[in-house]
Amino acid sequence: MSIPNLGYFLAGLTVLSILLYFVTSADSGCLTVSHMSSNGARDPPILQRLFWTITEGAVATVLLYAGNIREVKPSDPLWAMGTKR
């Protein structure tokens, strides 16, 4: 039994799921950075959250556009904190 257009439906559902994952991950990251930069305030200012959202989005866009996303290695955050690799 063949269901017409099932492939298109599943492809669209997959793209939507991946998009939702990236959006929620980015929002969580921006909220965390906002908390840290506001000395742990429970509700960081909206403008500060907006700043971090735009900044992180711009950095991700530049990396993707430049094609240097492979240059960001999982060990880079450890190196930036000054720990041994």
Image: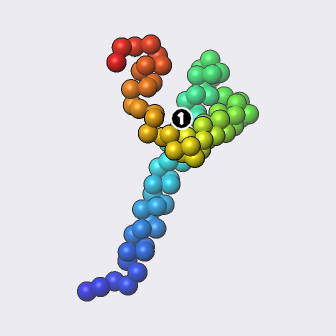
User: Would you say residue 26 is visible in this rendering?
Assistant: no
14 versus 58 height, above or below: below
In the rendered image, the vertical position of residue 9 relative to residue 49, given as above or below: below
Residue 5, horizontal then vertical, whole percent = 40, 81
Considering only vertical position in the picture, is 31 above or below 78? below
Q: Position of residue 85 (x, y in %)?
A: 34, 18
The residue closer to the viewer here, 56 or 46, is 56
Q: Give the labeled residue for mark 1.
A: 29
Q: Residue at x 38, y 84 (%)?
A: 4
Q: Tell me, yes or no, if residue 45 can be seen here.
A: yes
Question: What amino acid is found at the position of numbered circle 1 in the picture?
Answer: Gly
Q: Is residue 40 above or below residue 74?
A: above
Q: Nearer the viewer, residue 72 or 20?
A: 72
Residue 67 in the figure: left or right of residue 7: right
- Residue drawn at x 41%, y 32% is 73
Task: Choose top left, top right, bottom left or bottom right for residue 66.
Answer: top right
**Neighbourhood count class around disc 1 (C-alpha, 10 Å): few under 14, some 14–19, many 20 upward:** some
Residue ranking furthest to the left: 1
Residue in the foreground of this view, choosing between 66 and 8: 66
At a point 55% along the width and 30% down the height, the residue shown is 32
**Secondary structure state at the residue bearing disc 1:** helix
Image x and y of residue 68, in percent: 50, 40
> Residue, x 51% and y 44% (percent of image)?
67
